[in-house]
């Protein structure tokens, strides 16, 4: 058998017709040498599959969409199940996911808007809103030039950007304690900006 394979290889090599042969870069050789050899590929006709045209028809995917919006909705549903069962939150970075021209619009349309939303202004504007599905939040951050720098879906009870950090709580307690000790109030009818 080895001699037959070798003879086939030799004929193909001499004629320059190496179709159906693949290079064996592992250093195996019929004659025991360490040089790369060409071995017969019994799957040589698999390239005819490239010529077969396959059309995928999906009623849920419109022109200009990749279908990633629908996939993300399944991912969100799974994350909600995990949140309910274990309390574990999940963040999906939408800027890292390839979207077609209408995928983002479709995803946001499917998620809708719930009752809670917030706008933060810290080194740019951040918008946070709960979708129509409780526990699914859309978080968008923009820099001072208005460019989107983060776009995420958080599956959580409360997005991290809305929770008070321990250092901020400590600072607030210190200011409130000073107000109580000195008797000074930050709010006056003439200056409502310094109020609560």
Image (cartoon, helix red, strand yellow):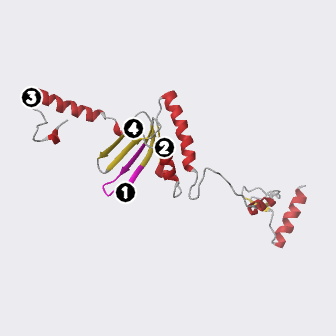
Nearer to the camera, 128 or 52: 128
Q: Is residue 85 left or right of residue 130?
A: right
| Mark toward the viewer: 2 or 1 | 2
3D distance between C-alphas at marks 1 and 3 = 44 Å
Q: Residue at 39% across / 42% down in the picture?
A: 129
Pointer 1: residues within 10 angstroms few (<14), some, or many (20+)?
Answer: few
- The magenta stretch spans which residues? 138-150
Mark 3 → mark 4, Cα distance in angstroms: 38 Å
Specify the quadrant of the image occupied by residue 169: top left
Crowd around label 2: few <14 · some 14–19 · many ≥20 (10 Å): some
Give me the residue at 47% from left, 29% from top: 87
Please tell me whether the stretch drawn in magenta is mainly helix, strand or loop: strand
Q: Which residue is mark 4?
A: 115
Magenta stretch: includes residue 144: yes
Work out how far the residue at label 3 is from the one at label 2, CA to CA, in angstroms.
Answer: 48 Å
Q: Nearer the viewer, mark 4 or mark 1?
A: 4
Q: Which residue is mark 1?
A: 147
Answer with mark 3 or mark 4, whichever residue precedes in sequence. Answer: 4
User: Looking at the image, which is closer to me, 151 or 171?
Assistant: 151
- Identify residue for label 3: 183
How far apart are labels 2 and 1 at the CA level? 23 Å
* Residue indicated by mark 2: 111
Residue 37 is at least partly visible in this image: no
Is 160 on the left-hand or right-hand side of 12? left
């Amino acid at each position: 058998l080895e001699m037959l394979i070798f003879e086939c290889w030799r004929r193909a090599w001499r004629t320059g017709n190496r179709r159906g042969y693949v290079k064996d870069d592992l250093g195996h050789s019929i004659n025991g040498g360490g040089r790369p050899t060409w071995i017969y590929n019994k799957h040589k006709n698999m390239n005819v599959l490239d010529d077969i045209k396959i059309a995928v028809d999906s009623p849920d995917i419109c022109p200009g969409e990749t279908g990633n919006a629908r996939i993300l909705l399944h991912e969100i549903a799974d994350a909600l199940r995990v949140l309910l069962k274990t309390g574990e939150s999940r963040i999906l970075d939408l800027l890292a996911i390839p979207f077609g021209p209408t995928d983002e619009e479709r995803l946001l349309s499917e998620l809708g808007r719930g009752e809670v939303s917030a706008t933060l202004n810290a080194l740019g504007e951040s918008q946070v809103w709960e979708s129509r599905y409780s526990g699914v939040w859309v978080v968008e951050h923009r820099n001072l030039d208005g460019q989107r720098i983060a776009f995420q879906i958080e599956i959580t009870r409360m997005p991290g950007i809305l929770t008070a950090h321990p250092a901020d709580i400590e600072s607030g307690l210190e200011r409130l304690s000073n107000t109580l000790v000195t008797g000074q109030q930050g709010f006056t009818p003439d200056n409502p900006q310094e109020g609560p």
